């Protein structure tokens, strides 16, 4: 075995198996293109490590002979390269899924490799805005730009993020054909999964005002939210506008467009919304992803308690 050998070329058989696994993840589990690219990078890193570790390109038999020792060695090598505990946990999860898939097709026992556990990491809590901060931001957005239609556009998009819990990419992918908005909006989110999101009248009114002022005609096959030159609005433009507004309001750097989606979920939970409903509205594949907002609520309550009952 060698530890510092140059990466070896991927064996044709393993390259074919990796491509088939990625195709199955894309089709059967409806993974997004971004996720598939991440999985591919994860597995290429792992297979490259095995090639260097054993001095020969990895084959199915290589995976069948893996033990916790090799898995720990890979994890240690990735951490030494600077990979965070969170990223390593995701990488090892992809590796275990691929090994499990390979064991089913090649008939080997993968229990030793699969027994290894990923690193523990503390999941960072979302940083939502307080309700009054979110309201102040939306009010400022309506007047923040010298061009009235651009100010109305920014206010309309931010209202959608806060009022419907959309991701910024989901709001900006809307086209003219989506207008007028119905009582519920069909959103295609990560992995092309569709969900129904109720539309509040305030969001509908904000978009109507933007369209009234917009100099570009509403066309069914054109973007609903346009940039200054008429193309689809770039999210970095909205991010820059948000940066200026949070500075005017004295808000922290965590007050980004995505923070409005966090605020939607947190405020809905505080108002009595149940986790399953919030999961569906946000389009989370797993309830555990949505449960992070209970931590936000608990952290807020603890902060209020400490402020009201200071310790001497």
Image (cartoon, grey):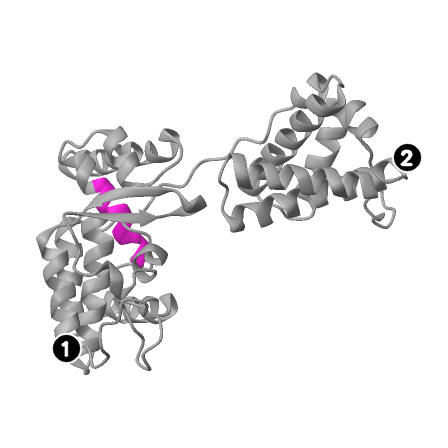
Residue closest to the eye, 307 or 93: 93
Residue 311 position in % (x across, y down): 21, 33
- Disc 2 designates what residue? 1
Categorize mark 2 by other alpha carbons within 10 Å: few (<14), some (14-19), many (20+): few
- Disc 1 designates what residue? 213
The quarter of the picture where the C terminus appears is top left
142 displayed left or right of 73: left
Where are the magenta residues, as a range? 257-266
Q: Which mark is residue 134?
A: none
- Please tell me whether residue 112 is drawn above or below residue 290 in the rendered image: above
Q: Residue at x 73, y 37 (%)?
A: 17
> Under tag 1, what secondary structure?
helix
Categorize mark 1 by other alpha carbons within 10 Å: few (<14), some (14-19), many (20+): some
Answer with the quarter of the image where residue 25 lies: top right
The answer to whether residue 243 shows anywhere in this view is: yes
- Please tell me whether residue 83 is drawn above or below residue 216 in the rendered image: above
Q: Residue at x 20, y 61 (%)?
A: 179
């Amino acid at each position: 075995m060698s530890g510092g050998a140059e990466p070896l070329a991927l064996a044709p058989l393993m390259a074919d198996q990796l491509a088939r696994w990625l195709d199955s993840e894309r089709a059967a589990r409806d993974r997004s293109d971004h996720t598939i690219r991440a999985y591919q990078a994860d597995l290429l890193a792992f297979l490259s490590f095995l090639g260097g570790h054993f001095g020969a390109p990895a084959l199915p038999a290589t995976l069948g002979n893996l033990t916790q020792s090799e898995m720990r060695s890979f994890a240690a090598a990735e951490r030494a390269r600077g990979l965070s505990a969170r990223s390593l946990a995701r990488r090892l999860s992809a590796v275990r899924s691929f090994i499990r898939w390979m064991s089913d097709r090649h008939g080997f026992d993968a229990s030793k490799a699969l027994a290894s556990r990923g690193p523990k990491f503390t999941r960072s809590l979302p940083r939502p805005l307080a309700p009054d901060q979110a309201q102040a931001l939306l009010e400022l957005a309506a007047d923040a730009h010298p061009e009235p239609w651009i100010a109305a556009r920014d206010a309309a998009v931010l209202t959608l993020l806060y009022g419907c819990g959309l991701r910024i990419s989901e709001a900006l992918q809307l086209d003219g054909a989506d207008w007028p908005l119905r009582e519920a909006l069909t959103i295609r989110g990560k992995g092309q999964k569709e969900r129904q999101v109720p539309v509040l009248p305030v969001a509908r009114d904000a978009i109507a005002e933007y369209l009234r002022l917009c100099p570009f005609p509403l066309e069914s096959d054109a973007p609903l939210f346009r940039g200054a030159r008429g193309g689809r609005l770039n999210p970095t433009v909205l991010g820059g506008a948000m940066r200026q507004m949070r500075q005017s309001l004295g808000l922290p750097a965590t007050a980004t467009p995505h923070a409005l989606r966090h605020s939607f979920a947190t405020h809905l939970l505080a108002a009595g919304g149940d986790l399953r409903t919030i999961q569906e509205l946000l389009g989370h594949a797993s309830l555990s992803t949505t449960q992070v907002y209970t931590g936000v609520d608990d952290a807020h309550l603890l902060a209020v308690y400490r402020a009201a009952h200071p310790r001497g």
